Image: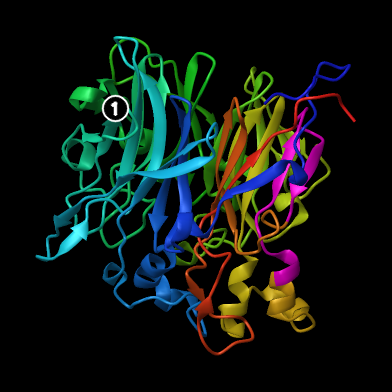
Amino acid sequence: MVATINRLGVRPGLNSEHFKLIAYGGFGDGHNSYAHAMAWFKGKLYVSTIRGAFSLMRKRQAGSLGLDVWPVEGPVDPFDLDLGAEIWAYDPRLDIWERAYKAPMILGTHGKMIPRDVSYRAMTVHRESDGREVLYACTWSPARGPGPVVLRSEDGRHFEQTCEPGLVGLPVTTIRSLVSFKGRLYTTPAGTRGGSQNISGHVVIYESRDPAAGHWEPAMDAFGFGDVGNKSVHEMCPWGDYLYAGTLNHSGFQLWRSRCEGEPPYEWEKVLELGCYRGKENQGILSMMPFKDALYIGTGIQGGGIDKANDIGPAAAELLRLNEDLSWDLLVGEPRDTPVGYKEPLSGRRAGFDIFFNGYFWRMAVHEGWLYMGTFEWSGWLGYVHHSRWPGAFSNVLAHVTPKVLFENQSGFDLYRTNDGVNWVPVTTSGMGNPYNMGLRTLESTPYGLFLGTANPWGPKVMPLDGDAYTFNPRGGCEVFLGNRPIGRLP
């Protein structure tokens, strides 16, 4: 479906009323927490999930979160649940979903059966040397598993393992990014057993000219581009003749680029540093998207905007724009002096679009001439956190507003769109009417419209903020929306 073009040659953007809920309750199972990755492949939408996200978080971080009560019902050992990741396929012509793939069970290092994959963190369509388009997915391995792998599918139903665990035997647990560029596939291993899912001791971009055969080699000659402060390559994005790579760095992200020409390892050029001089509050690059001769960059602090382990945050995300001459603009964020002059937000909006709880600018997509950007919004946590752990800035506010009122009126991801990068229109500021949709994790532009996939780990049973027993949550579990305008005349 394609909307009519107006007199200025621009299709009208989508508003909340143009989106239809096409999957809810975690595809019928509230343990499907995130729509973790999306890809449009052979006329169908493919959506991967991570299951039991709150239970996995409870295992890793419960002691540091200071919760009065755990918000979602679940076992102490998350592997008492079925944590096997799933891939779902949607045919928009028939309006039908089907589960295309389920993680196999394997024997863990502790002698018990576990799923090989707890998530498929990234998916991409790659054109191989013979011209065929193939769907690739990278996995997140349990700590007691053998390590992450790259999967390949020619039909969206049968997925084969293409490489040894850990990509090339690396001691990592997850693969964060998967990007097709100049006929090759690029990926970024991350995660450590018993540690962070983002930070790795092996900060290297890998390239494959034959991913079907599992041949991978380093695309760079030094860990972290030679800077020990770079804790991971958090995001990659092709733009023009370059592959751009954004890092997570506790002193502020860095952005690097390479033409990836000749033989690897390649030469890399540093483009931005120190989080564009905001420092640690721009800890990492969470999203990148080319749009109208510029590269748009969304930032964030791991942990949803609060990195307790490294005493960073809470702070809201910023939006930056890199121009072709490598100058940069602050679009949404905090005014500041920099070595390249005073920067103030061109949109007039402070960090988080003036919402402190927008900890990530998480995903972006271009659809019918508009740039869309979705956030991760963490206010839903506050009602479960002991008051002594509340951010100091909110002690006075929350003395007058109950957590339930805050949840019902503030929570849920935001989605904005722009035609010029400066003027932004809110599509939703309430998670599409569901406050449990705490993040917009995936966006995919297709011929049938713009698909949205949410991060919603609040299922199947949740502890109400004014309750004393877990109850079934009909709006818990990831959701998928499809947005389009009917064909016809403009209003």
Magenta segment boundaries in residue numbering: 408-429
Horizontal side, residue 257 vs residue 429: left or right? left
The outermost residue toward the front is: 94
**Quarter of the figure that contains the C terminus:** top right
Residue drawn at (69%, 78%) of the image:
403
Residue beneath label 1, please?
A: 221
**Quarter of the figure that contains the N terminus:** top right
Q: Give whichever of 81, 257 is nearer the camera.
A: 81
Residue 420: in magenta span? yes
Residue 122 appears in the rendering: yes
Q: Position of residue 22 (x, y in %)?
A: 58, 47
The outermost residue toward the bottom is: 468
Q: Position of residue 160 (x, y in %)?
A: 22, 34
Residue 114: in magenta span? no
Residue 339 appears in the rendering: no
Question: What secondary structure is found at the residue carrying circle 1?
Answer: loop
